[in-house]
Image (tube, rainbow, N blue to C red):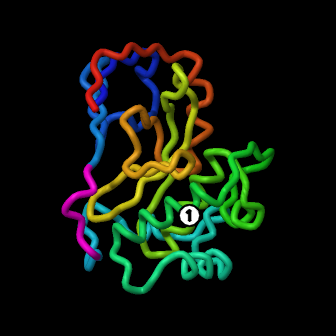
Amino acid sequence: MLRLRIDGVKGKDLYIHGGRQSLKGAILTVRKESMENLPDRILQYPPSLDGRTYLESTPFIQARDPIIKAQVRAILLPRDTLPVKAEKLVSWVYKNIRKRPVLSLPNALETLKNLMGDCNEHAVLLAALARAADIPADVEAGIVYQNGRFYYHAWNVLYLDRWITADATLGQMPADVTHIRFVRGSERQGDIIGLIGNLRLKILEQKK
């Protein structure tokens, strides 16, 4: 659990409150999700989740491309349960994509072909692989704490009967509580660039 005071976000169109994050006034609490008691498969999505939206192929998350689908078949086994599928996909992206900046828009298919990219490329590729495996997935962006500072970062959420935060760049599932989400959706990542320099954060409490 991480509890901190966050200033500089008032009046912004952000997704700070919801899921593992709760915001009361200026106090944000982030709680790590549990991987316990997840089902082997999902037979029906709840009415609150539009599963189709999170399974769609998009211009930059090409979940139905034959190359993406073939890679999923190479990673997963037919007998794998839903949580095992998710963990295998996160692990594969973490181990096989070289951590290098790419001077182009994040693109899952190009990332798979080039096997390199920063957090944005890792996130769109994992989203595409998960959707191709019929796991609802999306991209989230915000900040993460590393080496004594908070930095801009992008990662994923995967729906495994509930949303689980996953970070293929750092090889974490669930992702740790220093991942603070501001937006969800790959098309929203640019919305937070101007926000980051105006943020003021003070960590109040942290529990492992």
Q: Quadrant of the N terminus?
A: top left
**Residue 120 screen position, x and y as percent:** 63, 47
Q: Tell whether position 38 is magenta.
A: yes
**Residue 121 screen position, x and y as percent:** 65, 52
The correct choice, above or below, for 89 with respect to 192 in the image is below
Q: Is residue 172 left or right of residue 58?
A: left
The magenta stretch is 34-40
Residue plotted at (48% across, 56% down): 138
Dot 1 surroundings within 10 Å: few (below 14), some, or many (20 or more)? some
Please tell me which residue lies in front, 204 or 60. Answer: 204
Residue plotted at (77% across, 61% down): 114
Q: In the current view of this chain or complex, which residue is farthest to the right?
A: 103
**Residue 164 screen position, x and y as percent:** 35, 53
Q: Tell whether position 136 is magenta.
A: no
**Residue 82 screen position, x and y as percent:** 34, 72
Circle 1 sits on which residue? 92
The quarter of the displayed image where residue 206 is located: top left
The quarter of the displayed image where residue 44 is located: bottom left
Magenta stretch, main secondary structure, is loop
The correct choice, above or below, for 126 with respect to 120 in the image is below
Residue plotted at (46% across, 16% down): 8
Q: In the current view of this chain or complex, which residue is farthest to the left?
A: 37
**In what element is the residue under mark 1?**
helix
Q: Quadrant of the C terminus?
A: top left
What's the residue type where badge 1 is placed? Trp
Residue plotted at (32% across, 35% down): 17
The correct choice, above or below, for 198 with respect to 165 in the image is above
Please tell me which residue lies in front, 55 or 92. Answer: 92
Q: Is residue 181 left or right of residue 64?
A: left
